[in-house]
Image (tube, rainbow, N blue to C red):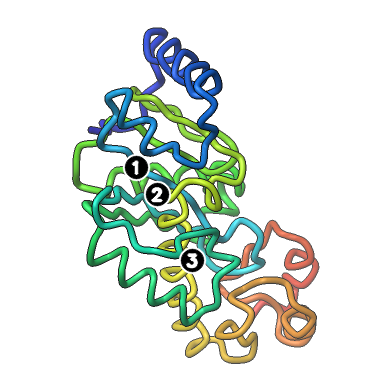
């Protein structure tokens, strides 16, 4: 179980290196990573992914998902490659079948205070802390931002290669989209319902006219250019 922010011990670091070597040597690749990890004794694997690094407004959201190997929903892949309606269907299927799910949310204000990389790491740690179940291995999409007392396997493009990471990607995307749709009620001039805080042309024009809102990221370009117009 995760106990705060811990650094991997030398033993665990060696274990991760050995595990990576075994995975390469057995020729399985990462497509069946969860199944392969189970063969090596890691049977409570959690996939972690985040959404919201790039937007000009809104939070970073991470999800941590422990799937039931016997009840993996069909069609899991990178959330960006799934139509919105199908993504919601899959998120509901994940919620009803997963062994555990945790969500971590870090506000735009915190992003400005600690930078986007640290905010992403914090969101992932919050998601793991919120999962409420024991786990023995973590798979993270992309950069190995988190350092734990258990093995952490980073997989480039993991949200399209590992089912647990794909599930986390879908859940995080649906949660963040819903948050931004709610923010559209308070700040309709930016059309967050449609752009979800990303820097579309329409969004930039709204920033020029109205200035940034309270949920914009003031340290991001071009938001910082319009702080004098802050609404």
Q: Residue at x 29, y 29 (%)?
A: 42
Q: Taking 165 as reference, is 56 above or below it?
A: below
Look at mark 2 in the image and give the residue it sits on: 164
Q: Quadrant of the N terminus?
A: top left
Q: CA distance from mark 1 to mark 3?
A: 17 Å
Secondary-structure class at tag 2: helix
Helix, strand or loop at disc 1?
Answer: strand
Whichever of callouts 3 and 2 sits on the residue coming sooner in the sequence is 2
Q: Is residue 53 above or below residue 157?
A: below
Q: In which quadrant of the rendered image does the C terminus lie?
A: bottom right
Q: Is residue 123 visible?
A: no
Label 1 crowding class (10 Å Cα cut-off): few <14, some 14-19, many 20+? many
Of marks 1 and 3, the one in the foreground = 1
Residue 166 visible = yes
* Element at label 3: helix
Circles 3 and 2 in contact, beta carbons < 8 Å: no
Instruction: Tell me where residue 46 appears, x and y as whole percent.
Output: 34, 42
Please give the residue where the numbered disc 1 appears in the rendered image: 46
Of 169 and 198, which appears nearest the observer? Answer: 169
Task: Write the residue at 47% across / 46% down.
Answer: 162
Could you give the CA–CA distance between mark 1 and mark 2, rounded to whole angstroms? 7 Å
On screen, residue 230 above or below 26: below
- Place residue 137 in its image quadrant: top left
Query: Marks 2 and 1: in contact by CB < 8 Å?
Result: yes
Give the quarter of the image for residue 195: bottom right
Labels 1 and 3: the sequence-earlier one: 1
State left or right for residue 162 relative to residue 36. right
Q: How crowded is the residue under tag 2: few (<14 C-alpha within 10 Å), some, or many (20+)?
A: many
Q: Position of residue 51 (x, y in %)?
A: 53, 59
Dot 3 corresponds to which residue?
A: 173
Q: Farthest residue toward the front?
A: 27
């Amino acid at each position: 179980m995760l106990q705060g922010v811990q650094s991997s011990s030398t033993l665990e670091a060696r274990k991760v290196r050995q595990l990576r070597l075994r995975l390469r040597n057995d020729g399985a690749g990462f497509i069946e990573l969860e199944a392969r990890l189970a063969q090596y004794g890691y049977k409570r694997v959690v996939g972690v992914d985040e959404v919201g690094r790039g937007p000009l407004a809104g939070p970073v959201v991470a999800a941590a998902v422990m799937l039931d190997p016997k009840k993996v929903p069909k069609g899991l892949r990178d959330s960006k490659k799934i139509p919105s309606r199908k993504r919601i269907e899959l998120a509901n299927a994940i919620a009803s079948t997963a062994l555990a799910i945790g969500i971590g949310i870090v506000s735009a204000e915190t992003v400005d205070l600690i930078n986007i990389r640290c905010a992403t790491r914090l969101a992932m740690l919050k998601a793991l802390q919120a999962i409420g179940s024991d786990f023995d291995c973590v798979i993270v999409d992309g950069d190995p931002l988190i350092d734990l007392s258990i093995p952490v396997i980073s997989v480039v493009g993991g949200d399209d290669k590992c089912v647990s990471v794909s599930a986390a990607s879908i859940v995080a995307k649906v949660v963040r989209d819903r948050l931004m749709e709610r923010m559209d009620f308070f700040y309709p001039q930016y059309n967050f319902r449609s752009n979800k805080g990303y820097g579309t042309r329409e969004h930039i024009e709204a920033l020029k006219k109205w200035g940034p809102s309270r949920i914009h990221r003031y340290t991001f370009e071009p938001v910082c250019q319009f702080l004098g117009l802050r609404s």
